[in-house]
Amino acid sequence: MAQKNLASLIVRERRLNSRHLLHHKHPLNIRSRKHQQEKSPIEMTSSTNKLQEVYNQQGFLAALPVLNETQLREAKRTFSELEKELGEEYTQYSLHNVHIQYPWVWDLTQHPQILQVVKAILGPDVILLDSRFICKYPTLKPDIQKNEGGNYEHPYVAWHQDMRYWGIAGGPVLSVWLALDDSLQENGALQVIPGSHCAGMLTHRQAIRPGNMLSVNQEIPEELLQTDEAVFCPLLAGQMSIHDGLLVHASDANTSQRRRCGFVIRYVPTCAYPTHDPDRPRKFAATMLACGTDRFNHFTT
Ligand SMILES: O=C(O)CCC(=O)C(=O)O
């Protein structure tokens, strides 16, 4: 994607608030998959500086093309096999770090279009920290979590910053959100507050509303946020967004009849290191060198 397009895309996204998107099922910033395949990796990141500049300013980039049609079809096919084998309750959120188990998942983490963007932001030496499929199924079937009134709560993701619970210092965490399905407002696309990564770490607490998919059930109280500035990151299947570990983000429940499946991959530069928190010891058992050289060996035990 030419950088001029990328920059204008981000600026346009800032202008689109959720109310606006309600009236645009296919907002202008989603390019057709046919069109996006015409762009080469070199075109996509023709100016590393520009890419970094927009990312540093906004804390995210959206609608970046990754998978071609064949790769997407294959990823969806293999994911459905896992769904059949393990069941949707499992594949919703429990396919964690399976890049060490399934070669096709490892290949996704090594996709040249992904690594090209990741290297542009983090530099040449990068560790793959963690990966997880996050799948929101259509809400035809009630979710298992009930609130006090006995009503069912559908899975959503509360406002949070990834860094709060990662226990990483010495370098940023960059998250890739790769869409296996179209991810739009109605099926619970990612929402971000542009520029919120510049505010530093915010206070988190235990989420009050049931249904929060996050493992530690964390949330930032809404009174600390300017949620009216939030924008959606709509993606076509095969596209990715990336976001900084300090960017405030969330996603609503999937109220549609279409699955929303994403593969989230976290990368750090090799200079980053795990911090030791006795209250929340963390293991990074699935870290791998994604590209370049690791002169630090911070993640090897
Ligand atoms: O998939 C979602 O809805 C949320 C993802 C998320 O919180 C993340 O990628 O850090």
Image (tube, grey):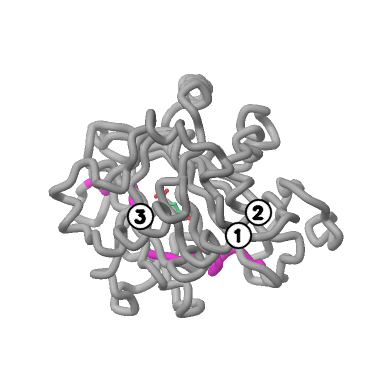
Q: In the figure, is residue 222 to the left or right of 39?
A: left
Residue under numbered circle 3: 9
Instruction: Locate residue 41: give its quadrant.
Output: top right
Up the image or down, 138 lies above or below 242; here it is above
Q: Residues within 10 Å of mark 1 (few under 14, many from 20)?
A: some
Q: Which mark is residue 121?
A: 1
Q: In the figure, is residue 95 to the left or right of 27?
A: right
User: Marks 3 and 2, how far apart in space?
Assistant: 21 Å
User: Marks 1 and 2, how far apart in space?
Assistant: 5 Å
Ligand 1 within 8 angstroms of badge 1 C-beta: no
Up the image or down, 292 lies above or below 162; here it is above
> Which residue sits at x=39%, y=71%?
220
Q: Residues within 10 Å of mark 3 (few under 14, many from 20)?
A: some
Residue under numbered circle 2: 119
Ligand 1 within 8 angstroms of badge 3 C-beta: no
Amino acid of disc 1:
Ile
Q: In the figure, is residue 233 to the left or right of 27?
A: right
Amino acid of disc 2:
Lys
Which sits earlier in the primary sequence, circle 3 or circle 2? 3
Q: Which quadrant of the rendered structure holds the C terminus?
A: bottom right
Which label sits in the foreground, 3 or 2?
3
First to last magenta residue range:
152-168
Amino acid of disc 3:
Leu
Which sits earlier in the primary sequence, circle 1 or circle 3? 3
Instruction: Locate residue 269: give its quadrant.
Output: bottom right
Q: Does residue 250 appear in the picture of this structure?
A: no
Q: Secondary structure at mark 3?
A: helix
In the image, 95 versus 45, the foreground residue is 45
> Which residue sits at x=50%, y=21%?
70
Q: In the figure, is residue 202 to the left or right of 233?
A: right
